[in-house]
Image (cartoon, rainbow, N blue to C red):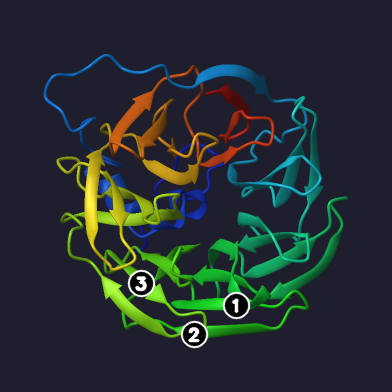
């Protein structure tokens, strides 16, 4: 029997549009009545006044399909912010003045993540099993199928290659700008979900099955697997390299009594959970802001989170956005951009 959970987005299964770290436990979440748990913490007991946080600058809905489900975001070489639309198989590019243009991708591609390649084209990673190369006019230059794949993490990495996390095949892969794909095995039982390039030149990959972080060499060899320091019932989700030479990642919890966290891992493999996140918030993507601090989206709360690098304080703000936030980007205009089900928000910060 297959259990499915729904959130009302065109009646698609919850695991189909969530960041990959949440898909495995979507059915369990439906049974337990969960999505994330915990309480906000700044690491002190005196509750100092909260510093000013992001504030709503603009809301954009025109030109966005009603069931889009904005999933990934990146600054394009053309000065626009590019979003993937998981449900509608589109890319949506928005100018900093809010003009949105949608470009259809391959049918059933279900684009999750997006990045700019070393060739200055837009590259999408698809849950539907394809990687697509798109120019800044929105024209698909090539579609590359990866048999058996579900890909929701892709970056421009070492060697002039694009690197991706393929949890469909339980592998880490590379693709050249001409479309040659190679995939590399990971430890048995692992399922890669998100990928980042560390300051040490290695690839760092989150695994939501074994609740661990993998260190992968530029040659595709798994150098280490780290899990010590991750709380029980917490699972790594999105990961990003930060200016302090560490990597930070969001975690989700699959029990309502367990708090989700923001985690940090050093390039030596030391994991520390630096803060908890509010119950039922569903922390998702995490990015570096213009101020060098980290910002993360929350699927199940109308909030945006911040990790202050210097103090490791985790703070959440309610800037007036809607729920359903997954895509987040530090825009070229100095604002924070968040995509939800069918709305794009620009925040001053």
Q: Quadrant of residue 66?
A: top right
For mark 1, give the secondary structure.
strand
- Residue 281, x across and y down, in percent: 34, 34
Q: Mark 2 and mark 1 in contact (Cβ < 8 Å)?
A: yes
Task: Determine crowd level at label 2: few under 14, some 14-19, many 20+ residues with C-alpha closer than 10 A.
Answer: some
Q: Quadrant of residue 316?
A: top left
Question: In this rendering, is residue 110 above or below 325?
Answer: below
* Residue furthest out toward the top: 49
**At 75% from the left edge and 74% from the top edge, which residue is drawn?**
177
Going from the N terminus, do you reach mark 3 or mark 1 first?
1
**At 43% from the left edge and 85% from the top edge, which residue is drawn?**
221
- Residue 117, x across and y down, in percent: 71, 63
- Residue 60, x across and y down, in percent: 69, 24
The N terminus: image quadrant = bottom left
Query: Does the image show residue 33?
Result: no
**At 53% from the left edge and 48% from the top edge, which residue is drawn?**
12
Task: Determine crowd level at label 3: few under 14, some 14-19, many 20+ residues with C-alpha closer than 10 A.
Answer: many
Q: Mark 2 and mark 3 in contact (Cβ < 8 Å)?
A: no
Q: In which quarter of the image is residue 121?
A: bottom right
**At 76% from the left edge and 70% from the top edge, which residue is drawn?**
143
Spatial separation of the CA atoms under disc 1 and disc 2: 9 Å
Q: Nearer the viewer, residue 115 or 151?
A: 115
Q: Name the residue under label 1.
A: 174
Going from the N terminus, do you reach mark 1 or mark 2 first?
1
Q: Mark 2 points at which residue?
A: 184
Question: In this rendering, is residue 32 above or below 38?
Answer: below
Spatial separation of the CA atoms under disc 3 and disc 1: 16 Å
For mark 2, give the secondary structure.
strand
Q: Mark 3 points at which residue?
A: 214
For mark 3, give the secondary structure.
strand
Task: Determine crowd level at label 1: few under 14, some 14-19, many 20+ residues with C-alpha closer than 10 A.
Answer: many
From the viewer's perspective, tell me whether residue 12 is left or right of residue 128: left
């Amino acid at each position: 029997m297959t259990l499915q959970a729904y959130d009302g987005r065109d009646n698609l299964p919850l695991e189909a549009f969530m960041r990959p770290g949440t898909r495995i436990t979507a059915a369990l979440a439906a049974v337990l009545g969960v999505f994330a748990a915990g309480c906000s913490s700044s690491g002190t007991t005196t509750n100092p006044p909260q510093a000013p946080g992001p504030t709503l600058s603009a809301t954009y809905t025109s030109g966005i399909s009603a069931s889009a489900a904005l999933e990934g975001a990146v600054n394009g070489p053309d000065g626009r912010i590019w979003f993937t639309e998981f449900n509608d198989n589109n890319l949506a590019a928005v100018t900093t003045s809010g003009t949105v243009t949608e470009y259809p991708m391959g049918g059933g591609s279900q684009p999750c993540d997006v990045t700019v390649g070393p060739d200055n084209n837009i590259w999408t990673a698809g849950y539907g099993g394809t990687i697509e190369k798109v120019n800044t006019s929105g024209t698909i230059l090539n579609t590359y199928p990866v048999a058996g794949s579900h890909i929701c993490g892709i970056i421009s990495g070492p060697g002039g290659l694009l690197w991706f996390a393929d949890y469909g095949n339980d592998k880490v892969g590379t693709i050249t700008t001409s479309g040659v794909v190679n995939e590399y095995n990971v430890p048995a039982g692992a399922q890669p979900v998100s990928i980042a390039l560390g300051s040490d030149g290695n690839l760092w990959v989150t695994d939501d099955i074994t609740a661990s972080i993998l260190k992968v060499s530029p040659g595709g060899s798994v150098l280490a697997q780290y899990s010590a320091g991750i709380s029980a019932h917490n699972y790594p989700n999105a990961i990003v390299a930060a200016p302090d030479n560490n990597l930070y990642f969001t975690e989700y919890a699959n029990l309502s009594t367990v708090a989700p966290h923001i985690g940090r891992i050093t390039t030596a493999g030391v994991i520390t959970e630096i803060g908890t996140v509010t119950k039922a918030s569903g922390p998702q993507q995490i990015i570096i802001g213009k101020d060098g601090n980290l910002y993360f989206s929350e699927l199940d709360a109308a909030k945006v989170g911040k990790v202050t690098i210097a103090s490791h304080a985790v703070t959440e703000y309610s800037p007036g956005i809607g729920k359903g936030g997954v895509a987040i980007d530090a825009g070229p205009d100095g604002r924070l951009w968040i995509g939800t089900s069918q709305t794009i928000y620009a925040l001053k910060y």
